Each structure stands twice: as structure tokens, then as C-alpha cells.
């Protein structure tokens, strides 16, 4: 348990070094860009730039610069965005919230499809459910998210006119992006739930449950599914990792103001402070999610506690 | 490999000669288009003809023309030389690096192994495409940068598989015999252990190809990867987006091509796995 926390902390420190190094590895002189920004877009003279670098500490050893940067982040004042001139934190907080909302909605869609399909596919191998889970999995893996999003927009917004094309502010705006991410994950999740439940179905306690006269639904949902939960929760954790790739694309297409879209925007507008912080925040959320999944698994199955 | 569904094995019935035949036929078609696409395409894929923009399919332009009057069919065919080739380079780079690192990690064991494996786990934690996006931006947008960035996030997959295989092979007597014969560790790794791992690596590489095609076209769609004007499928979809209400074929055609090619490589990977393992 303590070791697991230590690992997360080490990963967090590595991540902060990475996002610091990132800006210094980007093409273009960070100090010069910052000065151009402060001077309102004018190109600075060479001696002005040199003085600015000396005053702002750009000539200090890189380790000093890193520690100073880290300090400013921890104090909650990571500088202003090149683009908007606003405080970066305020912007990022809102974006993270929106992305978490979209992620939660997508997982809900995915589970709402995957749990019943997966459980019934396990109970009736080779049935319609089984085939459905297979089809969903194949399509979910082969269809690119960006194309799927456009097709959904075309069908539900342009042709049927049921939902808005893109945007933010009304609950209908989240429906299409969540459907895209949720359904594209549902198949693989269903296949995985199926194989986990199948694994459990051959155990003795399932036979016992059957023989004491419980109905099939109760055996499946009350006995088989809970015991298959550990690998399923672990997979969900892994899937959240994969999901963010889809989130980046889907947010960009649907103009959903989340952190994925901010990341893409900051890359294309070369907004270094925002990019740096995006990487840091996204990474930190990831580390937190992974830690949570491990703790959740421990809570579900006390036998694992010793192993971590 | 955890979440990879097996195609066509819902009933536990192992498939089937015809699937392999179809798969190989489709592969032959893809290879043909990659090698001799320019001879098949009826038009120059980048010839702009604004008078004939957004034309419906006709005999001259089997899939019509796009918003700049370029022949969609020709762009599609030429696209076989962009995305699949870029994906191939990504997979080759990732497989070579990951295999070398995995071999060393598994064979060296101890601290080296656990350090490398921590790094590999790190790569599994973070979202691959998002990391590739950031890396591509650092390397300076463009095709080469994107290919390197995708390879840089993908090698870990190979490193993990190869490291586990190395651990298994290391325990076998022939490795001990080779060591007793005084053969250098590097030679043992590459001449004795590596050949036994070719099959699983080949299977993984087939699946990787479809991942790389999806990722590369996705990044091109976002604006990294292929430069504007390139007949790249993801880019074609991005360009057709503004016209999709009246001309859905502009995004349907390249999208379906991507889906077909990806399914093809998945089917090939499955039949390869069934055959070899």
C-alpha cells in the first residue's frame, strides 16, 4: 500500500520533469516567445532579449529553473496563457471538469451496453448476444473515432436534426460525444465481461447457487458478476487510459471545451504555458485514476491487499 | 493483448480456410495498390480543377471530385502509398526498438530489468495518442515527426512481450548450453533467443499495423502527420467535413477504406495467430 503510493509519487515527479523539459525541447526559444508576448507582439532587440533572459533567470542552471517552475505551480501561479492572457489555472480547472463529465457519461453508456450484453453472452454462448458483442468489438476496434463522430453528426444532426452538431451549454450537447466514445468501447468491454463471467460460471459456488433453486438472473447478477468484478474493474482502469485518446479527438470535433481539446489547441497555437500545464494535469489525473483503480480493487477483494 | 477480441470464434469453432483465402486476397490487393497505385489511378491526385469541383460520380471520376475538383478515386488509390506505408514504418521502428530493449531487459534481469519495466508500465499508463500528439509537436509537425512519435509510444508493447518471452526462453536448456559453449551474450540474444520469438512478434506486428493506420490517419485528421495536399485518408476526411451535408461520399469513401484495411489486418493477425500458436 505504501509502496504503491510511493510509486505514484515517483511517477508524478518524473511527469513534472517531462512536462518541464517539453517546453525546452520545443522548436523556438521559450524566453524570446515570452518576451514577444509581453511586448505585445513586437520583435525584441537582441540586447533587450539578453537582459530579459538574465533578469528572468533563463541563464540559470536548468535544475534551478525546474525547481522554480515547480514552485510556481505548487503555489498555484503558473503564468498566463499566450493566447488568452488569462490565468492558466482557472481555464484548466473548468476544462478538466468538462472532460471528467464527458468521460463519466461515456463510461455510463459503455457499461449500460456492455454489462447486459457481456453477461448474457456468457450465459448463452453462441447466441444473438454473443454475436452482438463480437460485432460491437470488431466495429469498435476498426472504426476510427474521428470518422465515427462525423457519421453520427451527419445522421443525428444534419439528416434527422435531433441533436446539435457541436457546442456546449445544454445537456443535448453531451449526447453525441458520449455515445461515440461509449459505444466504441462497449464491444471490447462486453467481450471481456463475457470471458470473466464464463470463468466464474464453472466454479462450484455457481452450481451450489443453481442447486439451491435460485433463478438464473439471480445467479448471474448476484453471484457470478460480483465475483468476476476484480478483472473487470482493472480493465476499466486500463480502458480509461485508452479512452482519453478518443476523448482528444471527439472533444475537438464536437467543440466540447475539455482538456483534450485544450491540449490540441495549445499545440497548434504553440501556447507553451498551457501545453505544459495540460500535460502535467492530464498526467496527474492519470496517475490518480490508476491509483484509485488499484485501491478499488483492494476494496472489492480483500485477498489482494497483501499483494500490492 | 488483453482486450483483443478473437474474430469469428464465437462458438469456439475455429475458423476456416475461406477467411484466410479472402484475407490473403485482400492483402494482395492492398499490396498491389501500394506498389502500382499510380498506374491504376485515372488522374493526377493533386490536379486542381475548380470548374469541376464537387462533381457527382461519373465515368471519368468514378467517385466524383472534391472541393478543389481533384479526383476522389485517384486520391484514394494514391492514399495507399501514404497511410499504410507510414504505418509500416511506425511498426518497423517500434518493433525493432521494443524487441531490442525487451531482449536486453529480460536477459539482464535484476535492477536493469525492473527499471526498464517501470518505464514500460509508464507507457501503458498514459494515453498513447495524446502522448504522440505532444511528442509530434515537440519534434516539429510533419510526417516524419508523427511517424517517430507514434513509434516512440508504441515500442513498449513489444518490449513487454519480448521481455516475457526472453524470460521463458532463458530458462530452457539450450540457452545454458550456448552459454556453456562460451558464446557472447549479444550473440546468444540475437542468434539463439530471437529466432524463437519471431512468430509472436509477427502476430503482434500485424495487429500493430491496424493500430498505426488508425492513429496516423487520426493525427492527420487533427492536422499533424500528412501535410496539407497529401492524398491521406484522414486528411481527406478532414477536408470533406465542411461539405458532408451535401456530399457525404467525401467522408464516407476514405473512412470506409480505413475501416476495411484495419479489419483486414485484424483478420490477418487472427489467422496468423491461429496458425502459429
Image (cartoon, coloured by chain):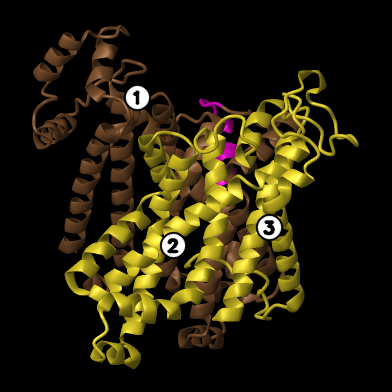
Chain colours: A brown, B yellow
Q: Determine the secondary structure under disc 2.
A: helix
Magenta region's main secondary structure? Answer: helix
Q: CA distance from mark 3 to mark 2?
A: 21 Å
Which span is picked out in magenta? A167-181
Which of pointers 1 and 2 indicates the residue nearer the eye? 2
The stretch drawn in magenta includes residue A197 = no
For the C terminus of chain B, the quadrant is: bottom right
| Classed neighbour count for the residue bearing mark 1: other residues with Cα under 10 Å, few (<14), some (14–19), many (≥20) | many
Q: CA distance from mark 1 to mark 3?
A: 42 Å
Q: Determine the secondary structure under disc 3.
A: helix
Q: CA distance from mark 1 to mark 2?
A: 33 Å
Which of pointers 3 and 2 indicates the residue nearer the eye? 3
**Label 2 is found on which chain of the structure?**
B
Q: Which mark identifies residue B95?
A: 2
Q: Which mark identifies residue B261?
A: none
**Label 3 is found on which chain of the structure?**
B
Q: Which mark identifies residue A271?
A: 1
User: Do we see residue A236 in this rendering?
Assistant: no
Please identify the quarter of the rendering in which residue B45 is found. top right
| Classed neighbour count for the residue bearing mark 2: other residues with Cα under 10 Å, few (<14), some (14–19), many (≥20) | many
Amino acid at each position: 500500500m505504501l509502496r504503491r503510493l510511493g510509486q505514484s509519487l515517483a511517477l508524478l515527479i518524473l511527469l513534472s520533469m517531462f512536462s518541464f523539459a517539453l517546453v525546452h525541447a520545443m522548436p523556438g526559444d521559450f524566453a524570446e516567445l515570452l518576451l514577444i508576448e509581453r511586448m505585445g507582439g513586437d520583435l525584441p532587440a537582441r540586447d533587450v532579449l539578453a537582459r530579459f533572459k538574465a533578469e528572468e533567470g533563463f541563464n540559470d542552471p536548468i535544475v534551478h529553473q525546474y525547481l522554480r517552475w515547480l514552485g510556481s505551480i505548487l503555489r498555484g501561479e503558473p503564468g498566463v496563457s499566450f493566447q488568452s492572457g488569462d490565468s492558466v489555472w482557472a481555464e484548466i480547472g473548468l476544462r478538466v471538469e468538462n472532460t471528467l463529465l464527458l468521460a463519466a457519461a461515456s463510461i455510463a453508456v459503455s457499461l449500460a451496453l456492455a454489462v447486459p450484453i457481456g453477461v448474457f453472452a456468457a450465459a448463452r454462448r453462441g447466441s444473438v448476444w454473443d454475436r452482438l458483442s463480437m460485432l460491437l468489438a470488431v466495429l469498435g476496434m476498426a472504426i476510427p473515432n474521428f470518422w465515427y463522430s462525423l457519421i453520427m453528426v451527419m445522421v443525428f444532426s444534419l439528416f434527422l436534426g435531433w441533436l446539435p452538431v457541436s457546442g456546449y451549454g445544454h445537456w443535448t450537447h453531451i449526447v453525441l460525444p458520449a455515445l461515440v466514445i461509449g459505444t466504441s468501447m462497449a464491444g471490447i468491454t462486453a467481450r471481456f465481461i463475457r470471458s470473466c463471467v464464463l470463468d466464474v460460471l464453472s466454479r462450484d459456488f455457481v452450481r451450489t447457487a443453481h442447486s439451491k433453486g435460485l433463478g438464473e438472473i439471480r445467479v448471474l447478477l448476484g453471484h457470478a458478476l460480483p465475483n468476476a468484478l476484480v478483472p473487470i474493474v482493472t480493465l476499466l482502469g486500463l480502458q480509461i487510459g485508452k479512452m482519453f485518446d478518443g476523448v482528444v479527438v471527439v472533444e475537438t470535433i464536437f467543440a466540447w471545451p475539455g482538456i483534450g481539446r485544450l491540449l490540441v489547441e495549445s499545440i497548434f497555437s504553440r501556447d507553451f504555458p498551457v501545453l505544459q500545464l495540460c500535460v502535467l494535469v492530464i498526467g496527474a489525473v492519470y496517475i490518480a485514476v490508476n491509483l484509485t483503480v488499484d485501491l478499488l480493487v483492494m476494496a472489492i477483494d480483500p485477498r489482494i491487499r497483501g499483494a500490492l | 493483448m488483453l482486450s483483443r477480441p478473437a474474430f469469428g470464434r464465437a462458438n469456439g469453432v475455429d475458423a476456416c480456410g475461406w477467411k484466410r483465402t479472402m484475407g490473403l486476397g485482400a492483402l494482395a490487393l492492398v499490396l498491389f495498390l501500394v506498389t502500382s497505385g499510380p498506374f491504376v489511378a485515372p488522374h493526377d491526385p493533386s490536379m486542381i480543377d475548380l470548374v469541376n469541383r464537387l462533381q457527382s460520380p461519373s465515368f471519368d471520376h468514378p467517385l466524383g471530385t472534391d472541393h478543389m475538383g481533384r479526383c476522389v478515386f485517384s486520391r484514394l488509390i494514391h492514399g495507399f502509398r501514404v497511410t499504410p506505408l507510414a504505418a509500416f514504418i511506425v511498426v518497423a521502428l517500434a518493433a525493432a526498438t521494443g524487441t531490442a530493449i525487451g531482449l536486453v531487459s529480460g536477459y539482464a534481469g535484476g535492477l536493469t530489468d525492473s527499471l526498464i519495466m517501470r518505464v514500460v508500465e509508464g507507457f501503458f499508463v498514459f494515453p498513447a495518442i495524446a502522448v504522440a500528439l505532444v511528442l509530434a509537436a515537440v519534434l516539429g509537425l510533419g510526417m516524419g515527426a508523427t511517424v517517430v512519435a507514434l513509434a516512440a509510444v508504441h515500442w513498449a508493447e513489444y518490449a513487454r512481450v519480448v521481455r516475457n518471452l526472453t524470460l521463458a526462453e532463458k530458462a530452457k536448456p539450450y540457452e545454458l548450453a550456448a552459454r556453456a559453449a562460451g558464446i557472447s551474450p549479444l550473440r546468444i540474444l540475437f542468434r539463439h533467443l530471437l529466432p524463437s520469438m519471431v512468430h509472436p512478434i509477427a502476430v503482434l506486428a500485424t495487429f500493430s499495423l491496424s493500430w498505426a493506420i488508425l492513429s496516423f490517419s487520426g493525427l492527420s485528421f487533427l492536422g499533424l502527420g500528412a501535410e496539407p495536399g497529401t492524398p491521406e485518408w484522414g486528411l481527406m476526411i478532414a477536408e470533406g467535413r465542411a461539405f458532408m451535408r451535401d456530399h457525404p461520399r467525401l467522408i464516407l469513401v476514405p473512412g470506409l477504406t480505413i475501416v476495411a484495411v484495419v479489419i483486414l489486418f485484424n483478420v490477418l493477425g487472427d489467422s496468423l495467430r491461429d496458425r502459429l500458436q
